[in-house]
Amino acid sequence: MQSLARIVLVFASVIALAAEAAKRPNFVFLVSEDNSVHYSRIYGNELAPMPAMEKLAAHGVVFDHAFSCAPVCSVARSTLATGMYAPKGGFQYHRRFAPATLPEGFRPWSQILKEAGWFTTNDRKTDYNFVHDIKALWDINGKGSWRDRPDKEQPFFHMQSFGTTHESSLHFSAGEMAKEQLSTPKSAVQLAAYHPDTPTFRHTYARYHDKIRQVDEQMGDVVERLAEDGLLEDTFVFYFGDHGGVLPRGKGYAYESGLHVPFVVRVPENFKDLVDFKIGSRVKGAVEFVDFGATVLKLAELERPALMDGKPFFGKGVRGADVDAREESFGYADRFDEKYDLVRTLRVGRYMYHRNFQGYYPDALQNNYRYKMLAYEDWRSQWKAGTLNAEQSQFFERRPAEQLFDVVADPHQVKNLSGDSKHLKVLMDLRGRLKAKMQSLHDLSIYPESFQVSDALGDPIGFGRAHAEEIKACLDIADLALQPFVRARGRLSAAIRSSSPWERYWALQTCATIGEASKSLAGVAKEALKDENLMVRLRAAEFLGIVGAVDPRETLYGILDQTRSIPEAMLAFNGVVMFSDFEPRFVFDAARLSSNKLGGEVARRYEYFGIAAPPKAKGKGKGKGKK
């Protein structure tokens, strides 16, 4: 009888172990919109308590160095959804004119979870810049949660976004500001070094701190529902910002303020063996949005797609010491609504390197949605009045081709160390590493968005691979801006006359980045004002206008009149706005700017110049310009 009892006991133990082995973890993502690490007590800001998220941290880990890769929602979320760097996949432009096609067979990781048996719900923001079938990604996209799954034993992945802290929450009027009573004392807020100390800025800061408290309560309610349902100790809860923001020079700008996000993970008791960190500790290593999907798939014991760029930071076999040793994060900024830029960043340890490929456009270049915020308008008014100090004025000035910041000593990134001989070794290391990163990804932003829309987005990764040598050649030309001009002059002159339109394009853009020192190439550049490629003409006009060699207006009028491509018109309008608002200034004729009325995002530029938008768009955004 005793033998039989032992057999029964062993059998029951085997059954129990099998049941435990079959149990799979749940995942919940709580996402606060437009929220960098600077506005939470978890990261040292005592004016922004987040008791609910702090409670998560006490039962999990806090990541000190988590980065969204992009400082705007659609690009950051596309990066998150795919685990792929956006410039490789062709989805690096905010609200792009045409979605990128993912490689054949590649699936966003929420779809992989769904197909493997997880019940997937998203409440509710998607904002993807790639072609997708929303029903393949989510069982419910909208109001819904794990409570809607038909089988209550089914594992689930629930993602919920909270717009309480969104940029629009700071779109208040002067009248509203005068009446509003806030919990956060305005006198106590700590302004960034680049912001002027004005009543408007102090009110904006205080209001945002209040919003942080509100969003914490809302996210805490979701955690309480998990606890009520008895699911908390089977569920990994991720809290993070969808990118940085949202005070001026945050969202939309590839600085720490736009990329460095809060990130806390509550580790469930029943799966704590999958996390090689002490509960209640802080992770020092750098993690990026590309890593999140890889981590969830690792925890779910599902295979990670080969094209994913991310690496898991939790899961069987993932050592905490190895994660803490990670020190590199990659960032990118391209177009935000109607405003173009081209910035790539690499943070390694305490240093952050910026490569400004279009640094001749000041950060302050008009973006209509940004300037709905009174703080932005206040900042610009202070600049026009000449009341800003050197640090506060940087936002309105042209940027050098490269910058290096010590983000520990200079957290607001206002002291550029790229010209400091003491940091030459660090500069050269990060410069080389960033270029190698762009080449390895076949960064598609080497080509203007108009060309990507017409020629590359049907197979972005295939296109990048096929054009790897051309991308490298253009990057080499761009890097001539980093050399003394006397050494770069000959190669730039030859590149302006190259048979390749994109080498001509980059040579002229590089001259514009160099500025006055490259004026001796104006004669050669004038030949490009009649180039068959409209985007080469654009870069020639910008360069020649910046150095005062040519009035750029006729060329810009001509491009806008001739193009049938919305992206080409948008690119041209970037130059128009630059010359309208910054030195050397030119006054543009609104009638000539609207000679070929296109639709889409061009309407934002019409609005800025007081031009009536067309009732219907003539351009489809896919106009194929000459190569």
Image (spheres, rainbow, N blue to C red):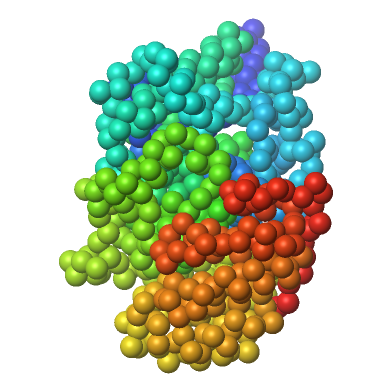
Q: Compared to 303, does 355 lie above or below?
A: below
**Residue 613 point in image, percent of width and height:** 72, 48
Please tell me which residue lies in front, 417 or 312. Answer: 417
Please tell me which residue lies in front, 111 or 185. Answer: 185
Q: Residue at 40% across / 83% down in the picture? A: 519
Residue 114, quarter of the rendered image: top right
Q: Residue at 64% across / 7% down in the picture? A: 1
The reply, left or right, for residue 569 in relation to residue 493 is right
Q: Compared to 461, does 37 lie above or below?
A: above
Report the label total: 0
Q: Is residue 438 visible?
A: yes
Q: Residue at 27% across / 46% down in the picture? A: 388
**Residue 360 point in image, percent of width and height:** 43, 65
Q: Compared to 144, does 100 lie above or below?
A: below
Q: Residue at 61% across / 10% down in the picture? A: 229
- Give the quadrant of the C terminus: bottom right
Please tell me which residue lies in front, 233 or 291. Answer: 291
The reply, left or right, for residue 457 in relation to residue 207 is right
**Residue 401 point in image, percent of width and height:** 39, 68
Please tell me which residue lies in front, 622 or 587. Answer: 587
Residue 168, quarter of the rendered image: top right
**Residue 123 point in image, percent of width and height:** 66, 26
Farthest residue in the left direction?
A: 422
Q: Is residue 328 visible?
A: no
The reply, left or right, for residue 607 in relation to residue 624 is left
